[in-house]
Amino acid sequence: MQPRAFITGIGMVGPLGMNTTSTWNAALAGTSGVDRITTFDPEGFSTQFAGEVKDFDASEYLDKKQMRRLDRFSQFAIVATGEALNHARLDPKTIDPFSVAIILGTGIGGTDSASKQHNLLASRGPLKVSPLYGLHMLPDIAPSLVSIHFGLKGPSCAVVNACSSSADALGQAFRMIRSGDSDIVVTGGTEAAICPLSVSSFGIMGALSQRNDDPKTASRPFDRLRDGFVMGEGAAILILESDRSVKSRGVEPLAELAGYGATSDAYHVTAPDPNCTSASRAVELALKQANIEPEEVDYINAHGTSTPLNDKTETAVIKKVFGDHARHVAISSTKSMTGHLLGAAGAFEAALCIQAILNDTVPPTINLANPDPECDLDYTSDGAKHRPINIALSNSFGFGGHNAVLVFRSVT
């Protein structure tokens, strides 16, 4: 029998708070973490708002020198990992360091460093570029720095797969547990792409909302007046352990990661395939691996980006896979509150799925005021709902046609 994969710890840093508890409470309250950008002057940009991490403090884990040198996405990863390890009661000093693997997802990596160093190059010349820039822009620097900071010596790697990056990281960690290659994996995702270069690029692409007069209502998944996604930033780290490790350590797991499905659209670099074939297959593969029937799913954390094509297509995917049950399953897009954390989104939303299971509560989709006839399912638009949640599913559908779906199961 294959080992089972359990989540024993969660760490979160994001637009709704600096830890898991504050993030979950803000999500239940339907709080928007979106506001005008403060990390640079957005005047003149077509989009001037984002879901920033506010009052970020990494001093518990990093000294001032490290905070000046490390890209923000790496800082987020270290802080969230610290919380997750503490939550799992996993002290790196008391375990075999080679027994813990690290797999983190990111869509863009150190783009904030890239933007700043390019400005230095252009304004002050090549001798002013930081010698550390070449390191801290790399997507794999985040898992490397987590490894160094916490002394974890198992295999480590980065998964770069656009908006499905951290969902795929969890999927790869799940496979490591199931194959017996590892008993403990630090996994999840991190992103800090709110910088002039990224905001201008996605804005010129036409992918971002331009609701500058009312940023808090800009992320409106499934709403008829949605006009693009809102960039967000943050990290979510999950500690994944085999049943053998959970038993030997005597810890109570939070939930089980029971299934993972991944496919490619092979259609377009930004638009989802309107036929829904590949995205539907990813959902079906995840459910099959978990040995779960569609009608057993209680909650779906939708990819729900607030873009015209994505939300319509995802609704069609859910209808195709779930049939009549599509109108009975609870659905929400927490991106309505956080914005889109790009490569960190999958792990962030997976963490919220686990909280939904633990609390038997569906977080809401906010800003859904104008129903779209093509998006006609139950998106939990009138506040959080208390209901039994045994099975939760998380969708991640990324640019490039990457589809990743995760299935979580209650252990109570």
Image (cartoon, rainbow, N blue to C red):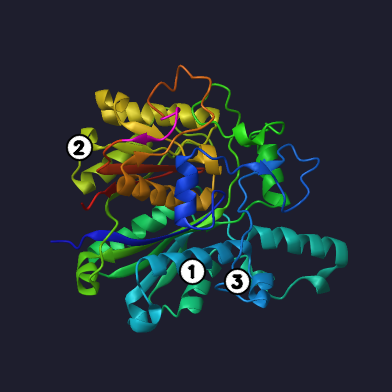
CA gap, disc 1 to disc 2? 35 Å
Q: Quadrant of residue 175?
A: bottom left
Q: Residue 376 lies in magenta, yes or no?
A: no
Q: Name the element at disc 3.
A: loop
Q: Name the element at disc 2.
A: loop
Q: Is residue 240 left or right of residue 339?
A: left
**Quadrant the N terminus occupies:** bottom left
CA gap, disc 1 to disc 3? 19 Å
Above/below status of 288 relative to 187: above
Query: Pointer 2: what residue?
Result: 293
Query: Pointer 3: what residue?
Result: 59
Q: Position of residue 315 (x, y in %)?
A: 40, 28
The local crowd at label 1, few if under 14, some if 14 to 19, many if 20 or more residues have their Cα within 10 Å, is many
The local crowd at label 3, few if under 14, some if 14 to 19, many if 20 or more residues have their Cα within 10 Å, is few
Circle 2: residue type: Glu
Q: Main secondary structure of the magenta part?
A: loop
The local crowd at label 2, few if under 14, some if 14 to 19, many if 20 or more residues have their Cα within 10 Å, is few
Q: Which stretch did the figure color magenta?
A: 380-386
Question: Does label 1 or label 3 sit earlier along the sequence?
Answer: 3
Q: Name the element at disc 1.
A: helix
